[in-house]
Every structure is written in C-alpha cells, then in structure tokens.
C-alpha cells in the first residue's frame, strides 16, 4: 500500500513544470548550439562581462546542468560567435506571434535567429525593470518546432546583473537556457525554472529534469518497454498534458491494485472456514 501512496504522491507532482508557449514547442534536433552575438558587447560599466567571461558562464550552464539529465536526449554545445544578427544589442525582442510587440517597433525588432543566441541588450522595454536580469524568447518557429531563441542580458545602466556572484550569474544563464529550449516557469522552489529566487539555482531539480525529458525524450525503441506502441519520441508534440507518462503510471497503478487484490483473495481463501 505504501507503494501505491508513493505513486499517487509522485503523479500529483508531475506537471509542475510548464512550457514557454501554449503548444509545448521544442527544438526538433536534439543537438542545439548556444552562441554569443559577437556584435553586441556587454557594457563594462553596466554588466561588466567580456565575451570570454560570458563564455565562462555559458559552459557550466550547459555542462553542469542541462546536459546532465540521463533521461533527456538534448545535447547543448557552445557554438562560438555570430556577428550576423542585426540590432540584437538594441532592438526589441518579440515572439513571432506577438502582433502588439511587433507593431510597437516597426522595422526594429530583432531578426529571427537559428539555434540559441545570447546577447547584451539595452532597450528598457525588453526588460520592464532594472531588476529583470535577462529575458528569453524563441523568435523563430517552424510549425511547432523552435528554430531559434534569443537570450538578452539586461545591459542598461543600473542593471542588477552586475552585482550577482559568478555562481548566481551561471544560474541566471542556465535558467534562461531553460526558457530557450522550451520550458516555462514552475512553482517548485527546488527547480532551476522557479521564477523568483536566483540564489537557489545551484542544480537542476527533479521538476526541471522531468520537463526537459518530456520535451527531449530519450528514444526507448528496441527495449520493448512500450510493447511496440508509439515511441515517446512520437508523442513529443502532443499538447502538454503529460498523458503518456500518466498512462504508464495508471497502468502500473492498476497492476499493483490487481496484484494486491489477488493477494487478499488468496489470503481469504486460505483462511479456515468456521
Ligand atoms: Zn524565467
């Protein structure tokens, strides 16, 4: 019975993670590059990061966090510098579906990118407040797949980013990469994708691992675990209901229930009749 209770507890926490859009988009390819926009240097007075220092934040955010999930097929890598994104340091960042955002900055939005591009940006409206450390928006899609995401570090004078410890800055970059690959916020305080406390972002939480594994599942073909039905990969683009995992759990639950019932029946049969 304890096992059943555990299962119920586990499944009730399943869907704390969210997605950064309403159709659970992710990159189609599991190998995604993270690049630095070489034409948008961070202001040494405001953010205080050289390109080399920025790379030193990106590398651990990739290697110590998102690439360490055994059930996720996502493999991020540092892809060097790109100088091709016009205006990435000063223009408005809009999602391609956000008409209000696009029309508010006619001809002055950041162009659609490929892969993940990180830049410093100093346009106030992108951040809303000096306390917003960074923002991330996938700004190019192909159907339900993300083609490219932009991460902007708040490069305004007085930006709070500069005063963070290096560990916290790594946490911020890892959190933003989480948005770039398709995750939204969670209310689980132990998660990297928790929206408030930066100084708790020291490792991925179980919730982050479940989220990234849902978006970038390891293929289980050939192991016979799913009885020859659809692979998890094929279920990837369904609405974020957590359905396939919940179905598996329900199946497991049923098996335990039947087993438990059989055991009880056996016991009652074994009892001597009076
Ligand atoms: Zn966030």
Image (cartoon, helix red, strand yellow):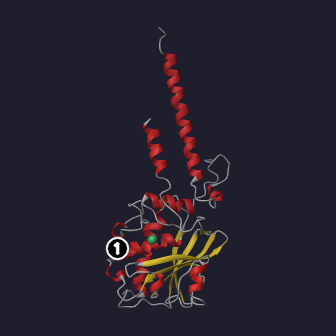
The image shows residue 33 at horizontal and vertical percentages of 55, 76
Residue under label 1: 167
The answer to whether one can see residue 99 in this image is: yes
Q: Nearer the viewer, residue 20 or 205?
A: 20
Q: Is residue 123 above or below residue 20?
A: below
User: Looking at this rendering, what residue extends furthest in the top direction?
Assistant: 274
Disc tally is: 1
Quadrant position of residue 233: bottom right
Q: Position of residue 49 (x, y in %)?
A: 38, 86
Q: Is mark 1 within 8 Å of ligand 1?
A: no
Please state, as top left, top right, bottom left or bottom right, where the N terminus lies in the image. Answer: top left
Q: Residue at x 59, y 67 (%)?
A: 25
Q: Is residue 110 visible?
A: no
Name the residue: 58% across, 64% down: 24
Kind of element beneath mark 1: helix
Q: Picture coordinates of residue 190 (x, y %)?
A: 38, 60
Would you call the spot at circle 1 few (<14 residues within 10 Å), some (14-19), or many (20 or more)? some
The answer to whether 20 appears left or right of 172 in the picture is: right
Quadrant of ligand 1: it is: bottom left
Position of residue 39 relative to residue 148, above or below, is below
Task: Please state the horizontal and vertical placement of residue 17, each as a whole percent of the image.
Answer: 49, 60
43 vs 40, left or right, is left
């Amino acid at each position: 019975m304890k096992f059943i209770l555990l299962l119920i507890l586990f499944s009730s926490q399943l869907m704390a993670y969210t997605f950064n859009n309403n159709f659970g988009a992710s990159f189609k390819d599991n190998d995604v590059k993270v690049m630095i926009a070489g034409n948008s240097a961070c202001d040494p007075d405001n953010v205080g990061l050289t390109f080399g220092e920025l790379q030193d934040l990106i590398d651990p955010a990739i290697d110590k966090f998102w690439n360490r999930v055994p059930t996720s097929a996502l493999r991020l890598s540092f892809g060097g510098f790109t100088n091709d994104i016009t205006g990435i340091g000063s223009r408005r960042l809009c999602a391609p579906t956000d008409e209000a955002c696009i029309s508010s900055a006619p001809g002055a939005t950041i162009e659609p990118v490929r892969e993940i591009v990180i830049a410093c940006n100093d346009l106030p409206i992108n951040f809303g407040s000096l306390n917003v450390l960074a923002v991330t928006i996938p700004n190019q899609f192909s159907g339900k797949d993300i083609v490219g995401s932009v991460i902007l570090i708040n490069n305004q004078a007085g930006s709070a980013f500069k005063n963070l410890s290096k560990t916290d800055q790594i946490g911020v970059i890892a959190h933003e990469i989480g948005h770039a690959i398709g995750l939204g916020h969670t209310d689980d305080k132990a998660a990297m994708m928790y929206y408030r406390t930066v100084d708790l972002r020291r490792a991925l939480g179980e919730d982050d691992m479940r989220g990234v594994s849902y978006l970038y599942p390891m293929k289980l073909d050939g192991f016979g675990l799913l009885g020859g039905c659809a692979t998890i990969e094929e279920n990837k683009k369904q609405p974020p209901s957590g359905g396939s995992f919940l179905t598996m759990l329900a199946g497991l639950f049923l098996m335990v229930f039947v087993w438990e019932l059989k055991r009880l029946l056996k016991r009652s049969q074994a009892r001597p009749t009076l």
